[in-house]
Image (spheres, helix red, strand yellow):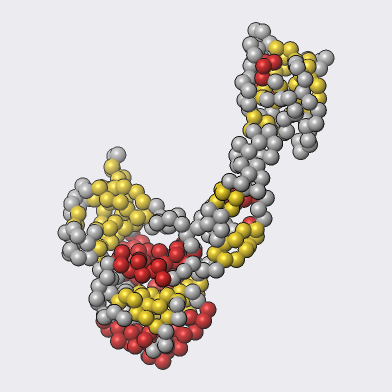
Amino acid sequence: MVDFFQLQTIEEVLARLDRFPALAAETIPLTLAWDRVLAADIAAPADVPEFDRACMDGYAVRARDTFGASPSSPAWLTISGEVAMGQVAAQPLGPGQVQRLATGGMLPPGADAVVMVEYTQELGDQTLEVYRSVAPLENVVQRGEDVKAGTVMLAAGTRLRPQDIGLLAALGVAAVPVRHRPQVAIIATGDEIVPITAAPQPGQMRDANSYALAAQIKVYGGEPQLVGIIPDRFAAWVSTIAAALQTADLVLLSGGSSVGTRDLAIEALRSFANAEILVHGVAISPGKPTILAAIDGKPLFGLPGHPVSAMVVMDVLVQPLIARLLGLAGPEPPWRRTVSARLSRNLASAPGREEFIRVRLRQEGETLWADPVLGKSGLISTMVKADGLIRILRHTEGLEQGEAVQVWLFP
C-alpha cells in the first residue's frame, strides 16, 4: 500500500503497469479487423503475386527482340496469340513473337518484358510494329516481388490499418487473431454530478467527464461502458465497483481521488479482499491526485474530477495501460502525432513535477508557434480551444519564449 500523495513520477507509474498482462485473443473475420491489434505474427502463405504479370497494357515480348527499336526504325514482331485476363499463359513465346495482354495478365513462358501499347501499332497481317525498346523486366511485376512466401509481413502488436487489411486480403487471410478490445467501465462519482439531460441546480454540474473519457477510450482502442453516476456513499461505491469488475477489464472512477473524498475512495477500494493501492498521487500537473489500484488482478484508475486533469491523465497514464492490455507494440500509440513548434511566451513551472500545458498552434510565415492556452483545470473549454499539449519536464523551471517544443496533437 502507499500513502496519499506519496507522489510517484510518471515513469514509476508506467513501470507499475507491467503487472497487467495483455488480454486474451480472439479470431475475427477480416471484414471486422480494421483498427484491431494482432495477437500473432502473420506470415505470407504464398508469393504475391503468384506469377510474373504485366503492370501495363501492351504486349509480352522478349526484351532482346526490341533492342534498337525507334520511331524511325521500328522492330517488326509477330503476334502469336493473346493472354486473356485470369487465364494461364500456356503458349510459349518464341523468337520474334509477341502476345497481347492487359495489366495484371500472366506473362507467357519465354517473355521477360512488356512493351506498352502506346509504343506499338498492329498491321493487318499479325505483324506488330514496336517503336521503343524495353529492358528485361520492364513493365513486369515478378512473382514474389510484392511479398515472398514465409515472410512475416505483420507482427503481433500491429494495429491494423486499411493498407494492412488490403495486404491480408491479398494473402488470402480471411480471419485474423486479434486481442480482445478492453472493456472499460466509467463510474462517475459525486453528490454534485447530474446526468447531462438534467438542469443543474446551484452547486451541481453535468456529467461531462464520462462522455469525454468514453471518447478517449474509443480513440485508444477500448470499448467504454458508461456505468452511471453514484453518490458519495460507501455502500454505493463498493457495490458499483464490484459489479463493474465483473464485466470490465479496466475500471475508471471519475472523481473521488482528491482530498475531499480520498478517505471514502481508499476505504471503498481497500474493502475488497484482493485489493492493492499501487499509486495515490503522481508528480504531474494537472492530475496530481490520481489513484492506481489492482483488485483481483484487474486495474482501476481513480481520476481527478476536473475535466482537464482527467483528460490529461488519460493521455499520459491510462492510454499506456490500454495499449498494454491490447498488446500494442512500440513505445507510442500509433495515433499519437507530434509536431515541432516554437513557444510564443515564457512559461514558468515548479520543479519536481511534470507539467502538461495546453497550446494552440499558429502559423506565422515559415514558423509554427505554440500559444499557451492558460486556465484552471476545471475549464473544459480550454481543451476545446487547444490543438495539443506540451510537456515541461520535472527537473526544469520552465520554458523560454522561442524555445523549440514538441506538441502532442489531440486526435
Q: Quadrant of residue 387?
A: bottom left
- Looking at the image, residue 58 lies above or below residue 85: above
Q: Position of residue 262 (x, y in %)?
A: 30, 83
For the N terminus, the image quarter is bottom left
Q: Nearer the viewer, residue 224 or 376?
A: 224
The number of discs equals 0
Q: Position of residue 270 (x, y in %)?
A: 36, 86
For the C terminus, the image quarter is bottom left
Q: Position of residue 389 (x, y in %)?
A: 31, 58
Q: Quadrant of residue 12?
A: bottom left
Q: Report whether residue 66 is seen.
A: yes
Residue depicted at x 67% and y 22%:
115
397 left or right, relative to 136: left
- Looking at the image, residue 131 lies above or below residue 254: above
Residue depicted at x 78% and y 17%:
78
Quick one: which residue is furthest to the front in this view?
Answer: 150
Q: Position of residue 219 (x, y in %)?
A: 46, 62
